[in-house]
Amino acid sequence: MWGPFKGDTDYFDPSKAPFMFNFRVENLDALLKQLREEGVTVIERSIEDANGKFGWVMDPEGNKIELWEPAEATYKADWYEQ
């Protein structure tokens, strides 16, 4: 999925890159815990909304990565199974 943002967005902060990777994951809380234990920089803010849970980490090069655990209704949607 491609999701462009306005040029002046701060959504990618603290990364200096003008992009962000987004990965669908299972059990976001457990994954963030494991990543912390492995020494990964976890951005200590997460949100949950109608689309699911979102958390963020930084890769070794300073790029922000978004981790998304879809909400049950979203996960069962057939749009991604085609």
Image (cartoon, rainbow, N blue to C red):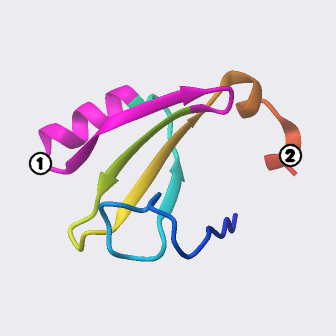
User: Which residue shows up at 24% across the image and 74% down it?
Assistant: 61
Which image quadrant for residue 31? top left
Report the side of 67 relative to 80 (left or right): left
For the N terminus, the quadrant is: bottom right
User: On residue 49, which mark appears?
Assistant: none
Label 1: which residue? 39
Which image quadrant for residue 70? top right
User: Which residue shows up at 86% across the image and 39% down it?
Assistant: 78
Q: Residue furthest top?
A: 72
User: Which residue shows up at 30% across the image and 36% down it?
Assistant: 32
Residue 74 rendering spot, x and y as whole percentages:
74, 32
Does 73 lie within the magenta span?
no
Task: Determine crowd level at label 2: few under 14, some 14-19, many 20+ residues with C-alpha closer than 10 A.
Answer: few
Dot 1 amino acid type: Gly
Report the side of 24 relative to 3 (left or right): left
Label 2: which residue? 79
Does 44 lie within the magenta span?
yes
Give the Cα distance between marks 1 and 2. Answer: 35 Å
Residue 69 rendering spot, x and y as whole percentages:
54, 35
Dot 2 amino acid type: Trp
Q: What stretch of residues is rendered in magenta?
A: 29-52
Residue sitting nearer the eye, 5 or 73: 5
* Labels 1 and 2 touching (C-beta < 8 A): no
What secondary structure is found at the residue carrying circle 1?
A: loop
What secondary structure is found at the residue carrying circle 2?
A: helix
Residue 15 rendering spot, x and y as whole percentages:
32, 67
Residue 72 rendering spot, x and y as whole percentages:
69, 23
